[in-house]
Amino acid sequence: MTRPWRVGIVKDTSKPMLGLHGLHTAFRGLPNVDVVAHVDPSIEDLQQKMAWTGARRHYASLSAMLANEALDIVVLCSRHPYDHLGQIEVAAEAGCHIYCEKPLSASLREADRVVELAEQQRVRICMAHPGRYAQEFRTMKTMLEAGEIGRPLTVYGRGKCDHRGGGEDLIVLGTHILDLQTFFFGEPENVYADVTSDGRPIVRTDRARTVEPIGPAAGDEVFACFRFPGDVRGIFESRRGLFDGTTAMTHMGITVIGTEGALSMRFDDAATRTLRISRGPGPLEYGCSFEDVPLAEDRVIPDAAPLDYSLCGQKDIPAARYFLEANRFAAWDLICAIEEDRQALSNAGNARLALEMIYGIYAAHLSRGMASFPLEDREHPLGEQE
């Protein structure tokens, strides 16, 4: 690819945010890429910020950058979902393709608008659901399709289950789990769910106090069961307060149970993450043992500079190499998607589906029945943001 790709970064450090994924470093070292500009209303530590992104010029706003730069791609680093629609509208109208932090939105109507806008403006949007680009989950998908654990029966996913457990965990971290379930097994057919607060079923007027501005959320415990094609069942669960940072126990992760074994991957925050397999044909409660799965790197970017792993652990960049690597391959996939006129592997449609699954959980619980997809009612079951 010989086209010079001009990239702009939007990262507002005046807004405190938790758990950023380091999107601002995603395009560093890619061939024929020029990170030309960096948007941040705050000029504190500006030289260091510019060094991390590799950008040459600074702007205080997205509109100022777009007025002065002819860009191909804009990177939106905010993890506050209500920031995204306005930024995407401005970037798409300027003809820019987009790499966007998750969640896409907290509003399904906004997510519908983003998908519609991308189609109208013929721009590609890649979403930061890194699991789709991580070697561990790519390998898991290949093994599932090859029948390594027989016929898949159930996929179990848990959120982090920390102080955000329940409704906040569902949208902030559950979006990763739900997106991976659709990555493996396609679009769900229906869901039933139970959401409680202090042991009682939530009602429509309930609200959880959230750490970040993520829109309506309720409950300190969430349990949901989806039905996927092929009679695969998908579980999502989050319970507040299970996480204990003093131990090595990691609740967040995904496990697929099949007729001839199981595959499991934890979302720990260590420098490495390990895909594991159990080849026992019996249920896990019979004491099946797990072994590590060796990974073979098949992600190749011709002429890319080596990744700078010294960035790991810097401000707003996770310590685990997993994110640095997944970001790079997501950025490269976006470039390839533009060139090949296709959707990125992780796109706005996938992200909208994860949000629709979240809406479905609340809708199923409140109806005390089952919610079928696609949802006809696009309003939030808890009511829109107050």
Image (cartoon, rainbow, N blue to C red):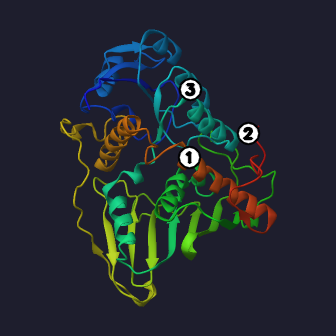
User: CA separation, marks 1 and 2?
Assistant: 22 Å
Residue at (48% x, 25% y) in the render: 12
Residues under numbered marks 1 and 2 in contact, where contact means CB atoms less than 8 Å apart: no
- Spatial CA distance of label 3 from label 1 is 17 Å
Vertical arrangement, residue 61 with respect to residue 97, above or below: above
Tag 1 residue: 349
Q: Is residue 119 visible?
A: yes
Q: Which residue is mark 2?
A: 385
Name the element at disc 1: helix
269 up-or-down from 282: above or below: above
What's under tag 3, amino acid-wise? Gln
How packed is label 1: few (under 14 Cα within 10 Å), some, or many (20 or more)? many
Left or right, 355 with respect to 276, comes to right
Task: Give the residue number, with chain letter if any, for mark 3.
Answer: 87
Give the amino acid type for the residue marked by disc 1 in the picture.
Gly
Q: Is residue 40 above or below residue 386?
A: above
Q: Residue at x 38, y 39 (%)?
A: 340
Mark 3: which secondary structure?
Answer: helix
